[in-house]
Image (tube, grey):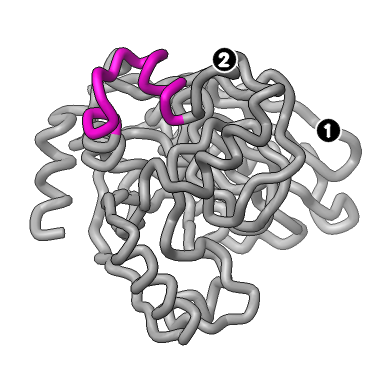
């Protein structure tokens, strides 16, 4: 049995309540934030305008002319008590495969272009992560990153950008890295970046400070709705989903990109019932169980 932290609530202006489950990111805190915000959506409480789950917290925007802040706070506290029971955190999630061309020439070029902003300018971003995590060679880093399933813990920054947190490994096994000293003014679309313990895939070109390790062959944001799997959502990520990275070479990268451009690519994914209680009891054994056959 694991213990969920106690939530702290704060009023933010006239229209917001901020709920802080923990100061630090942990899978426990994130599962609780997802369970509470999913329950709020299911209840369709009149007056709630927006529900935003985050890594270890969530934010609710409401209309004070329909529901008072104190009445809404009572709802939140009641749900919080229920969702402090680990058996109440089960989620229906998707496992999604993300093919990645690791250490590709484009992200290497960006490493070189913005090395004046980097804490270790003599190394590429990929080499910097190898050094800070004691990987002996390139393949060791690729195997470590691609063999670990990642939980989508929150979304934000730019449309479709999702934060991925590793599951099924001990804290000392997590790949961690400092960010740039000052952000790059540009990052290529679908670049895969690492910052702290998180992985992100840049949904659109833009500024960024995560260390770049490769390119995703598939988009995580489809504003033109060309792909069948993104017609309803535009965004690939849903908080609570698990993403599994698969290393690919240049030829397969180009083949998949061609399929995406023609609108014929279908994401490899499956739906599963995920039990945080079982995950924290069994750890990697449970992750291997739900990943079986994927």
Indicate which disc, 1 or 2, sits on the residue closer to the N terminus. Answer: 1
Instruction: Give percent across and percent down for residue 243.
Output: 35, 51
Q: Are marks 1 and 2 in contact (CB under 8 Å)?
A: no
Q: Residue 12 shows which numbered tag?
A: 1
Q: Nearer the viewer, residue 129 or 90?
A: 129
Q: Residues within 10 Å of mark 2 (few under 14, many from 20)?
A: some
Instruction: Give percent across and percent down for residue 90.
Output: 31, 48
| Residue 246 left/right relative to 107 | left
| Residue 81 left/right relative to 113 | left
CA gap between label 1 and label 2 equals: 40 Å
In which quadrant of the rendered view does residue 3 lie?
A: top left
Instruction: Give percent across and percent down for residue 68.
Output: 82, 46
Q: Nearer the viewer, residue 218 or 63?
A: 218
Residue drawn where x is 34% and y is 73% of the image: 255
Residues shaded magenta: 126-141
Residue drawn where x is 44% and y is 83% of the image: 228
Q: Which residue is mark 2?
A: 120
Q: Residues within 10 Å of mark 1 (few under 14, many from 20)?
A: few
| Residue 25 left/right relative to 14 | left
């Amino acid at each position: 049995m694991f213990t969920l932290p106690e939530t702290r609530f704060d009023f933010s202006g006239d229209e917001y309540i901020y709920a802080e489950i923990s100061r630090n990111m942990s899978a426990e805190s994130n599962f609780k934030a997802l369970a509470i915000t999913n329950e709020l959506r299911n209840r369709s409480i009149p007056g709630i305008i927006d529900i935003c789950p985050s890594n270890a917290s969530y934010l609710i925007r409401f209309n004070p002319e329909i529901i008072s802040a104190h009445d809404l706070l009572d709802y939140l506290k009641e749900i919080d008590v229920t969702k402090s029971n680990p058996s109440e955190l089960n989620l229906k999630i998707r496992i999604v495969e993300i093919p990645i061309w690791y250490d590709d020439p484009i992200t290497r070029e960006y490493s070189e272009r913005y090395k004046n902003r980097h804490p270790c300018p003599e190394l590429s971003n990929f080499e910097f992560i190898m050094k800070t995590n004691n990987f002996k060679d390139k393949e060791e880093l690729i195997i470590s990153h691609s063999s670990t399933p990642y939980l989508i813990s929150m979304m934000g920054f730019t449309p479709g950008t999702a934060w991925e947190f590793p599951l099924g490994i001990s804290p000392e096994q997590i790949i961690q890295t400092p960010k740039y000293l000052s952000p790059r003014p540009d990052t290529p679309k679908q670049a895969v970046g690492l910052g702290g313990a998180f992985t992100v895939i840049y949904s659109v070109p833009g500024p960024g400070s995560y260390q770049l390790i490769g390119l995703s062959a598939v988009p995580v944001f489809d504003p033109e709705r060309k792909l069948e799997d993104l017609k309803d959502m535009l965004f690939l990520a849903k908080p609570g989903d698990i993403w599994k990275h698969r290393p690919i070479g240049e030829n397969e990268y180009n083949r998949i990109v061609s399929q995406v451009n023609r609108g014929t690519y279908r994401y490899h994914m499956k739906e599963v019932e995920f039990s945080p209680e079982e995950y924290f009891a069994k750890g990697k054994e449970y992750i291997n169980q739900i990943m079986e056959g994927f």
